[in-house]
């Protein structure tokens, strides 16, 4: 704390050069008149002859420390002023250093300690004019008192004015530093928010990719397992049915592989790898009948109305994935003897998907924590502004009902 008061700013080499140049320039203008002139021969008179010169050099020389240590510069100017009261009965030109030091103390010394220059200035503004104007201190004239008051106002003004300017500059500098700190903090906050947004975007992308891969792999493997088991059971009785099952397995595998290549190709970093990635069109409304047909012969499809025109590919993909995931759960959990009914209703304002099965699921068998499939289905439908209902049917089996809004600009095919 004491070091901060004594050496608050710490002068750079450039500051030292500027302050030394200021002291040298003012010294050349103010010190030479007080050089040694008409030196007396008696040794006791040397002090009176050299006193004004020494005080002038000390007062101007203190300006070199005005930024490195304003309080030391104030001490040097104060000591030189006391010497001038002793050795000179007239104001000296070197008093020009007083306003400079008053400004420097106000500008660089922190806290209330800077006000010490006002106290010293107030005392000096009285002592100086008294030494210069009054000849007889015991019986001053009215004219001398008037001149004394005017001199006090002038001297005090030479301290208060630069002090006020220096304080104002200091406050402006501190306010600027505060604004810079606030701007830096705002910039750091912005970077942090941008980083968080990037992480959220990456998390959403990973979730979407995981959902896509789950839908593709889970459904394709379920279809392939069901077809393989069915083909194995019919291999001896109906070889042509086994051949059809193997064909369905091969087509399902190729389709799953193609879609996985499409998704993984987007993730590749190299542009040439992305350009060579095998992309296939995203599933649409017209692909749903083929999806149901490939899933199992125990699944039936009923379509009411005509698909709307002008809807986004995201909406068509969502409808396709809902049917796909519902049928995947049917194949995995409903049992080998269960049947399912897929009903899609295309309306003017919404699309409704109902997937009902009569499998072995009961209300008590419904899991309390749904798996990735149901959670991903719910995320897809919520992203499109729709609603999802999944529950066990009281009569047995499971129900998946999804409702998706149709954008206003879309129209239903006639």
Image (cartoon, grey):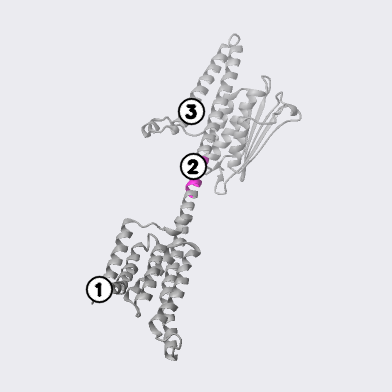
Q: Is residue 182 left or right of residue 237?
A: left
Rendering coords of residue 37 (x, y %): 24, 76
- The label shown at residue 198 is 2
Q: Is residue 196 left or right of residue 136?
A: right
How many neighbours does mark 1 have within 10 angstroms: few (below 14), some (14-19), or many (20 or more)?
few
Q: Is residue 195 magenta?
A: yes
Q: Identify the residue shown where x is 34% and y is 77%.
A: 88
Q: Nearer the viewer, mark 1 or mark 3?
A: 1
| The furthest residue to the bottom | 142
Above or below, 228 against 390 in this view is above
Q: Identify the residue shown where x is 42% and y is 68%.
A: 166
Q: Secondary structure at mark 3?
A: helix
What range of the chain is rendered magenta?
190-200
Q: Identify the residue shown where x is 56% and y is 22%.
A: 221
Q: Which secondary structure is most common in the magenta stretch?
A: helix
Q: Quadrant of the C terminus?
A: top right
Rendering coords of residue 176 (x, y %): 44, 61
Residue at numbered disc 3? 260
Q: Earlier in the sequence, mark 3 or mark 2?
A: 2
Q: Secondary structure at mark 1?
A: loop
Q: Earlier in the sequence, mark 2 or mark 1?
A: 1
Q: CA distance from mark 3 to mark 2?
A: 25 Å
Visible residue check, residue 74: yes
Above or below, 23 against 351 in this view is below
- The label shown at residue 36 is 1
| The furthest residue to the top | 236
Q: Kindly indicate whether the residue at mark 3 contacts the one at mark 1 (C-beta within 8 angstroms).
A: no
Q: CA distance from mark 1 to mark 3?
A: 100 Å
| The furthest residue to the right | 394
Of residues 376 and 207, the one nearer the viewer is 207
């Amino acid at each position: 704390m004491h070091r901060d008061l004594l050496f608050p700013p710490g002068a750079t080499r450039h500051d030292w050069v500027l302050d030394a140049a200021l002291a040298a320039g003012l010294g050349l203008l103010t010190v030479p008149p007080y050089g040694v002139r008409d030196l007396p021969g008696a040794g006791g008179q040397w002090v009176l002859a050299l006193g004004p010169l020494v005080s002038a050099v000390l007062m101007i020389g203190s300006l070199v420390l005005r930024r490195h240590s304003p309080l030391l510069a104030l001490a040097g100017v104060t000591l030189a002023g006391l010497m001038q009261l002793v050795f000179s009965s007239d104001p000296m030109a070197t008093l020009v250093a007083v306003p400079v030091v008053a400004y420097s103390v106000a500008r660089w010394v922190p806290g209330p300690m800077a006000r010490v220059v006002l106290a010293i200035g107030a005392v000096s503004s009285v002592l100086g004019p008294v030494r210069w104007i009054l000849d007889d201190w015991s019986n001053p004239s009215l004219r001398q008192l008037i001149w004394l008051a005017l001199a006090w106002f002038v001297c005090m003004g030479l301290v208060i004015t630069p002090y006020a300017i220096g304080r104002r500059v200091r406050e402006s500098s501190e306010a600027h530093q505060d604004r810079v700190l606030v701007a830096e903090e705002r910039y750091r906050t912005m970077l942090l928010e941008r980083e968080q947004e990037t992480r959220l975007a990456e998390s959403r992308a990973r979730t979407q990719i995981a959902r896509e891969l789950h839908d593709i792999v889970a459904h394709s493997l379920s279809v392939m397992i069901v077809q393989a088991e069915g083909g194995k059971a019919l291999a001896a009785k109906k070889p042509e049915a086994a051949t059809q099952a193997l064909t369905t397995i091969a087509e399902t595998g190729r389709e799953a592989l193609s879609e996985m290549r499409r998704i993984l190709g987007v993730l590749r970093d190299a542009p040439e790898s992305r350009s060579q990635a095998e992309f296939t069109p995203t599933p649409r409304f017209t692909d749903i009948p083929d999806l149901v047909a490939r899933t199992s012969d125990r699944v039936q499809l009923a379509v009411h109305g005509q698909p709307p025109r002008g809807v986004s590919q995201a909406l068509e993909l969502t409808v396709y994935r809902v049917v796909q995931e519902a049928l995947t759960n049917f194949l995995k959990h409903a049992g080998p003897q269960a049947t399912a009914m897929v009903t899609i209703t295309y309306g003017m304002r919404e699309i409704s998907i109902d997937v009902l099965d009569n499998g072995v699921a009961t209300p008590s068998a419904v899991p309390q924590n749904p798996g990735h499939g149901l959670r991903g289905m719910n995320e897809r439908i919520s992203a499109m502004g729709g609603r999802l209902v999944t529950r066990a049917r009281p009569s047995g089996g499971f129900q998946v009902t999804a409702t998706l809004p149709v954008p206003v600009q879309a129209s239903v095919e006639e």
